[in-house]
Image (spheres, rainbow, N blue to C red):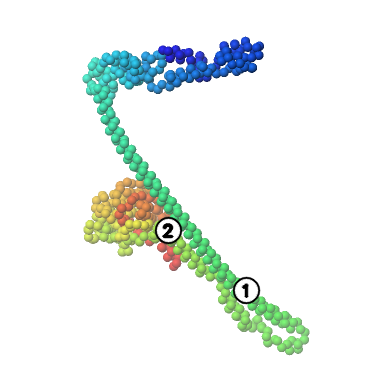
Amino acid sequence: MASAILRDELLCSICLSVFKDPVMLRCIGRVLDTQDGAGVYSCPECREEYQERPALMRNLYLHNVAERFLVTQPEQAEITGICCTYCVDSAVPAVRSCLLCEASLCDKHLRVHSKSPEHVLSEPSTSLEKRKCSVHKKVLEYYCTEDAACICVSCYLIGEHNGHDIKSLDEASKDKKEKLRNVLQKLMTKKEETEERVQSVEERRRKAQEKAAGEAERVTALFTDIRRRLDDLEKRVLSEISRQEKEESLSLSALIQQLEIKKDELSRKMRHIEELCNMADPLTVLQEPDTGDLCDPEEGGGDEDTGGHDRQLHGVDDLDVAVISDTFCTLCDIISGIRIGIYGEDAADILLDVNTANNYLLISDDLKTATGTREKQNRPETAERFQDYYCPQVMSSRRFSSGRHYWDVKISRSGRWRVGMCYPSIDRRGDQSVIGYNNKSWCMERYDNQYKVIHDRKVIRLPDNISSDRFRICLDYKVGQLSFYELCDPIRHLHTFTATFTDPLHAALCVAGGSIKILRGAASARKKTILT
């Protein structure tokens, strides 16, 4: 009570807060007014004298009292939690709340509070009415499992929940907590799985970034080498052209000099003949001793020097263009090197393994072409041969367990076909033997003029605007990528499978009508054409 009274005395009449920096106003001002004519001012509080009227100062005494009060009596705004309902003089934290009284109590008032059973105590709360039945105004003590509602004893005995499955709040809370723990466990499991997936995706992203950086570095080095080789080739060709031009220029200059001498000789003879032709004395013309050296153009015969010059002129030919052809051959080698740099190896030499060929497939003599047929072939039915009539398949004899490789195929425009790669452990009979429809194979398929890529029965449809009948399959075994390309102009990427290959891979074909032909590598074929 005393502290409450003291608080009232220390409250500012304007902001209603305890004084923080009080000053003396009205009384001090009146005293100083009376001292205006005396020439000296004396403070009635501390008796200190001033020559000039002093400015109003802080009330140190009142300031100290207010400061000590604030230290020993914190303001209500600074008290956390719920306050006691009965402590009206100051804010005292409550320790319990009575549901019957709808009041919160501190330690002092809790000691004198009724201990009867109907006075149910709970944790301090400001919403005590929520813990009572809205109909009977009694404490909620039970839980109706059918209606999922908290009810009072009257609701249980005579109310609308009479006859329902009723549990105590503790029991119902225990059951719900058990369910929540089960849900929490499931959520924790899903969270762990999600975290593992996040780590897996992050690992894939890291590997993709590392691979991209490595590929970028490799391609940069490759093109740097290409530019260097092209520059060297250009310099070599230009140097050869310049050398030939100089040699030809020297030969032609010597020939021109000889022809100039011959021209001067002819001019001299022409002047002499003109002089003879202009003479009037016939005796002088006939007695001219040099007439035997003169040649008559109409009589032919020419002289030996002229013939020699002509032969020399014919011996001087144009630039030797063979060096240009050699340049194209060198460029072909560079292009071949580019392909090897990109794919790691030249085009893979694929041969079909007749021992795995279905009896409804015709295999060409060169083991490069598979053609579907309705006439059964008389091959022995062994464990390694594909058996199903509706899926005539064949594997390659060569297998790949490392490096980069590619191979091209030409496919007939009719029939249903699949082309891809598989493990040697693939089944040879039944649904699991179809390439693309198990976890041991990957393929591209055309059926009803629709193109798809398939792995483990998961189908991804490709664009409808595929028009070429030639395709490329690229394998990067170490990285774990199998890619399909349409060999149009320019070459078009269709799809890339990403996997961790665990066994060697074989090329695999399925032809139900039509045929598939394995082509030679484009780089090797182009080089052969140029050289030929």
Estimate the x, y position of residue 370 in percent, counting from the top left.
Answer: 31, 58
Location of mark 2 (residue): 341
Residue at the extreme right of the image, as rendered? 280
**Residue sitting nearer the eye, 261 or 183:** 183
Does residue 455 show up? yes
For label 2, the crowd category at 10 Å Cα-Cα, with few meaning under 14, some 14 to 19 and many 20 or more, is some
The residue type indicated by label 1 comes to Ser
First of labels 1, 2 by sequence position: 1
Query: In the image, what residue occupies the spot 27% across and 58% down?
Result: 357
The residue type indicated by label 2 comes to Gly
**Position of residue 337 in the picture relative to residue 114 (left or right):** right
User: Given contact means CB atoms under 8 Å apart, are the residues at marks 1 and 2 in contact?
Assistant: no
**Position of residue 147 in the picture relative to residue 308 (left or right):** left
**Residue sitting nearer the eye, 341 or 485:** 341
Where is the C terminus found, in terms of image quarters? bottom left
Location of mark 1 (residue): 253
Q: Is residue 289 above or below residue 258?
A: below
For label 1, the crowd category at 10 Å Cα-Cα, with few meaning under 14, some 14 to 19 and many 20 or more, is few
**Position of residue 306 in the picture relative to residue 8 (left or right):** right
Query: In the image, what residue occupies the spot 49% across and 62% down?
Result: 229
